[in-house]
Amino acid sequence: MAHAQTAPAMPDADMKMVLDAQASLKGKPIETLTPAEARKQPTVTDGVNRVLKAENQSIKPQVLVPGVSSKDIMIPGAAGQLPARVFTPAGRGPFPVVVYFHGGGWVIADKQVYDGGARTLAKNTKAVVVSVDYRRAPEAKFPAQWDDALAAYKWTAANAVQLKGDPTRLALAGESAGGNLAVATAIAARDAGLPKPAIVLSVYPVAQTSTDTASYNTYADAKPLNRPMIKWFVDNLTNSPADLKDPRLQLIDANLAGLPPVVIINAQIDPLLDDGSLLETALRKANVPVERKVYDGATHEFFGTAAVVQKARDAQAFAADRMKAAFGTGM
């Protein structure tokens, strides 16, 4: 159900520490900037690194998430080569393979900013994770990002073996804009007759295009994601208002029948909280197995903050349990 609340909830102590650290880096409001300027603003990941440094901890990904190696490669997208980062767990394989899409409203951020979530997914699920830098808007408008996501999934399915992966155990995952891409790619893969993923992990996804849900109203001014930022993202992404009705953006109106099980993770303090709830309802209506968990006291972008935020560790463990069960690799 949607969270019925009038007063906005407050971030818990761990989360507040990260948000305060990000705020101390004096970023400008994204929605007042050009996309090029917006991409240079301090991120939640920068906030995490600031907290780690203050505690005299390493900020090196390989120290924070041991037992996973990473390698940057190029893979074919829908209109040219795309950078991707392949995370491989220790061991011989063959491992399950997860195609992962970063967040950032389809306009900002990249695989580097979202390294934490993807890297930990590789470790906790003992899977190869392919994190893809799809083309960003406004340089590439809708639906370039969805076309790239499908191309990346298609390539990964065809090349799983050379990645130490098992082509019979595939999954899709993503955060925020990437959480939308994960579900949309499962739909596109079904329609294209591509191998079916075993599971889809969708973390605080964009699932519909109205900015007038209860959570949008309660958390219109939330950090690190607010309603003006989302409007700015969508304005940079779309060609015209007609795009807002496209089922790739308006996922809750898409044909969801026959999709694999979907796991939805939401943060309580997030305009997109109700998007997760609405998507869960739409999936149930389509008879798709779905499980959704809301993390109270957590904000948008919390999933990749496990180095310093306990709720992120909890959410990552929950996601890994469900994914391993889907892969048949045990709990």
Image (tube, grey):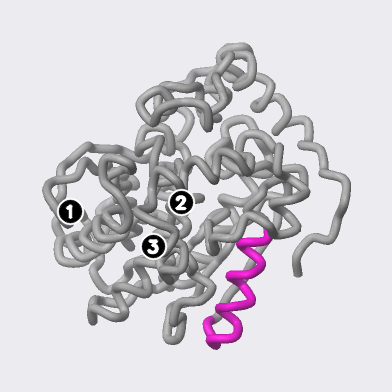
Per the image, the residue denoted by label 2 is: 177
Task: Classify residue 154 as left or right of residue 127.
Answer: left
Q: Name the residue located 55 percent from the left edge and 39 percent from the top edge.
A: 229
Q: Which residue is mark 3?
A: 172
Please tell me which of labels 2 and 1 falls first in the chain: 1
N-terminal of the pair, mark 3 or mark 2, is: 3
Between 275 and 21, which is closer to the camera in this rendering?
A: 275
Looking at the rendered structure, the kind of residue marked 1 is: Gly
Say left or right for 219 vs 331: right
The quadrant holding residue 241 is bottom left
| Residue nearest the viewer, comparing 171 with 22 | 22
Q: CA distance from mark 1 to mark 3?
A: 16 Å
Which residue occupies 56% across, 50% down?
Answer: 316
The region drawn magenta spans 274-288
Q: Amino acid at mark 3?
A: Leu
Disc 3 from disc 2: Cα separation: 13 Å
Work out which quarter of the rendered image holds the C terminus and state it: bottom right
Give the image quarter of residue 187: bottom left
Local secondary structure at mark 2: helix
Return the residue at label 1: 77
The label number, if any, that marks residue 29 in the structure image: none
Residues packed near mark 3 inside 10 Å, few (<14), some (14 to 19) or many (20 plus):
many
Q: Residue at x 48, y 69 (%)?
A: 251
Q: Residues within 10 Å of mark 1 (few under 14, many from 20)?
A: many
292 to the left or right of 327:
right
The rendered magenta stretch, by its main secondary structure, is classed as helix
**Can residue 156 be found in the magenta stretch?**
no
